[in-house]
Structures are given as structure tokens and as C-alpha cells.
Image (spheres, rainbow, N blue to C red):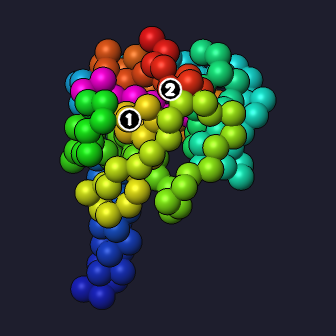
Amino acid sequence: MNKNNRRKIFAPTAVLFGAALLLAGCGGGAGTDGGNDGGASSASEAPKETAASADLGVASTSLGDVVVDANGMTLYYFTKDTEGATTSACTGECLVNWPIATTTSDSPTLEGVTGEVGTIPSPEGEMHLTLNGMPLYTFIKDTKAGDVTGQGVGDVWYVVAPDGTMIQ
């Protein structure tokens, strides 16, 4: 095999290997800050309602009615956050596993959510949605609307009820 043929084989293989490493890194590790071990199983039914036209809405899941983002994905509280703080306690690898819920509006739209909604700045300059003064996050392992696999992870991640209370 000549040198040019080896390059043609090596380059795509290296790209695939690099992509696999990148994806593996997104899984995070076990632990309380950004871990993804454990958690509740996916909902057995699709959400009855979604926030398709709202920044925050309500959906029915296996854990009851929970707050969801505009894509219908379940939102969570991180118990290491402090109510009313202007920054999130979830940083670095934690944010890979627990992406923040964002809005582009100064006045986030709501559908069925009765808690007090606000925003705080994210490290990337986005508007991080809050409910009753607590930042909101999605979970990387929730792959479809109605999933609640982040519930109870590390005993620090919990879904949010429409009034802003934590469901434990």
C-alpha cells in the first residue's frame, strides 16, 4: 500500500475515532455535580401537554405534571444552586450533562406554569431561565419529551412542579 492510500484510510478513521471520543466525553462521570448514573426511568407515555409555543410549559409524565422547555423536555433543579443567586452552581462538565434552559426573551412566555419565572446570565451570555429563583436545566440522557431519567441523579437533581416546587 502506498503512502497516499494509507492517508486516505487513516484520515476517515481518525475522524471517526475522534468523534467517538468526543461523544464518550459527553456522557460525563458519576457523582453529584454532573453525573448521569441512576435516575428514574423514562415516562411510559408521551406528555399530554407541551410548551411548543412557550418558553416554559407543563407536561404530564410518570412523575406527574412537570415543567418543560419549549421542546417539551423535562426541566430539573440542582440542589447545589441557591435560590435567588445570580449564577449557577453547575459549571464545566456539569453543564455538558445538564444543559441550561434558555430563553431569548426578556419576558419569557408561560403555559400552565404558576411559579415566578425569571432569568440569570449564563457563562456564555445566554439568558438562563429560573423558576422561583432557581436555575432550570435539561438532562442529556432525556432523549424525548416526557423522559424523566434525571430524577434523583446523585441525590441532587429533581424535576420541577408547575408551581416551582421540587418533586423528590
From the top left corner, tell me how far across and down residue 109 is, in percent. 62, 50
Instruction: Name the amino acid, label 1.
Output: Gly
Q: Residue drawn at (60%, 30%), measured in percent from left and top?
A: 114
- Label 2 sits on residue: 164
**Closer to us: 120 or 80:** 120
Left or right placement of residue 123 versus residue 140 in this view: left
- Under circle 2, the secondary element is loop
**Does residue 79 belong to the magenta stretch?**
yes
Q: Tell me, for residue 114, which label it has, or none.
A: none
- Label 1 sits on residue: 133
Instruction: State how far apart marks 2 and 1 are (Cα).
Output: 9 Å
Q: Is residue 71 visible in the rendered structure shown here?
A: no
From the top left corner, tell me how far across and down residue 57 is, in percent. 65, 38
From the top left corner, tell me how far across and down residue 167 is, in percent. 49, 15
Q: Residues within 10 Å of mark 1 (few under 14, many from 20)?
A: many
Q: Residue drawn at (56%, 52%), measured in percent from left and top?
A: 108
Q: Quadrant of the C terminus?
A: top left
Q: Residue drawn at (71%, 49%), measured in percent from left and top?
A: 52
> From the viewer's perspective, is residue 5 above or below residue 164?
below
Q: Indicate which disc, 2 or 1, sits on the residue closer to the N terminus.
A: 1
Q: Residues within 10 Å of mark 2 (few under 14, many from 20)?
A: many
Instruction: Name the amino acid, label 2.
Output: Gly
Spot the residue most to the right.
Answer: 48
Q: Residue drawn at (36%, 80%), measured in percent from left and top?
A: 8
Tell me where residue 5 sits by quadrant: bottom left
Q: Quadrant of the N terminus?
A: bottom left
Q: Which residues are magenta?
A: 74-80
